[in-house]
Structure formats: structure tokens, C-alpha cells
Image (cartoon, rainbow, N blue to C red):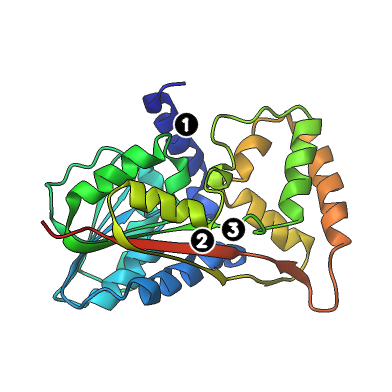
Amino acid sequence: MDSDQETQQVRQIFDALAGSYDSPATRFFPFCADRLVNFVKPRPGSKVLDVATGTGAAAVAFAQAVGSSGHVTAIDVSPRMLDKAEANIRKMALDNVDLHEMDAARLDFRRDYFHTLVCSYGLWFLPDMAGALREWVRVLRPGGKLAFTSFETSAFQPMLDDYIQRLQAFGARAPENAYGSQRIGSLAHCRELLEAAGLVEVQAECAQLGYHLRDENEWWEVVTGTSMRALFDRLPDDRQEALRREHLAFVAGLKNENGLWMDVQTRFASGIKPAG
């Protein structure tokens, strides 16, 4: 599969998810956006590029942080996600955000333009992560900061492993880069990616953004409202129901008096573009 085909596959996945992406069960997206603002500390009045904005959680958080004198440009490959982002931006009465449908690996921006570039939970969807990071550095001003987030290997466990194993048992064949967050293996790997892109003052740390879900049905909202759903949709209807029933029976056994704990351990990584 070439890069254009992979981009089209990602577009189709997220167009299908747009209607359910902002579920209360997936509130780790805005949690991550707020934490990313604190991690990056953008200056008021600065220009920010939000890559793979989805429904705009990071775009909203950074637009509020940079203030009316600043500006956020947000891009995504999925037009339906951008429609949801536009609605969320209007709801927050923000007038300092622009949205563009764009391939994150081929930016239509001039060199040395943005003060800050962020990508929340999106880098691993790009076939050539190293090449994408070099492209992102190109549009960043000298002295500007690039930051991305990715899931730690413990995130969504043990539910995710059980779900993937059952998908495989039911005959679902994973498309290339499915569950691709595993392509970024550790904090050390985050640092290596940023340093290889030419960034300095590289930092990487973890934060727990997890919370208790009510029950297994709310976990199923997480599955069907995120890219975890992509393989499930490839199964015939009768296999879908059997898998859902078996998987949720396993998940129900993990509950305690507080509900169902969902680990969302998240890596935050950043680096600075050198001057000169």
C-alpha cells in the first residue's frame, strides 16, 4: 500500500468516526489537550499549527491559550472531522482558528512560519513518521517548539489486548498501521524521533489521563468512538455481535466498586528548532 492509499484509508476511518468522536467516554481527548497546553506553554499572540486536529480539542485549548492576538491553524485529512471541529469552535465563540483539509505529511505552508506546532495522538497514523516530523520542522520558526503526544503501552489495557485477540480469532485482518500507537514504543523512542528531526532541548514525560468508566457498555463507546472500531467494521454482522458479546463479558469481570478503570497513560514529547 502506498502513502496515498494509506492516507485515503485514514480519511475513511475518521470520516466514519466523526459522529461519535466527542463521546463523554472519550473525554481523554480534551484532557490531553489541556495538559498539552501546560506542557508547551505557548506565548499569548503566537501562531500555532495543530496537526491532525480531529474534532478540534487541541485547537480550542491552544486558541484560548494564545488569546485574541494569537492564531491557531488546524488541519486534518478528514473533512467530516473538520466539520465537527468547526462546530466545536463556534460553540466556544472563538474567532482565532482556521481549519484546512490537508495531508499532515505535505503541508501547504511556507518555511519558518509557526511559533508552535502540536499533534495530539496523531503522529503514528503517518506512514513515514520521520519524514513527517522533518516536514513539520520546516514550517516551524527557529526557536519554535514542536510537541506531540502518544499512548503508553499500558493505555487501555487489559481491555485492548483482549479486543485485538478476539478480532484476530474472528478473522479480522489488520490493515497496515492499525493500532499504530504501538509504532512509537517508549519515551526514549519519542526523544529519538525528535532528535532525528533536528530538534534540540528535547523533553519527554508521561502523564496518567485515565478515569473510571461506569461499566463495559461505556467501554464499548470508547471502542466504537475511536480508531479501535476500524477492524470491527470489517467483520460480518453476525461475527460483530458474537465478538461484542464475548469481549464485553470479559470486560465486565474487570469492574470493581468504582466502576471500570481505563488507563490512558500518555507520553508528551517536545523539542525546539535550533536558531540559524
Q: With respect to residue 205, does 149 lie above or below?
A: above
Q: In the image, is 54 to the left or to the right of 142?
A: right
| Gap between marks 1 and 3 measured at Cα | 24 Å
Q: Which residue is mark 3?
A: 152
Q: With respect to residue 45, does 125 lie above or below?
A: above
Q: Residue at x 86, y 45 (%)?
A: 246
**Does residue 255 appear in the picture of this structure?**
yes
Amino acid type of the residue tagged 3 in the rendering: Glu
Q: Residue at x 82, y 48 (%)?
A: 247
Residue at disc 3, secondary structure: loop
Amino acid type of the residue tagged 1 in the rendering: Gln
Residue 22 numbered tag: 2
Residue 28 numbered tag: none
Residue 146 lies, in percent from the top left, at 30, 59
Q: Which residue is mark 1?
A: 9
Amino acid type of the residue tagged 2 in the rendering: Asp
Q: Nearer the viewer, residue 244 or 109?
A: 109
Outermost residue on the top side: it is 1
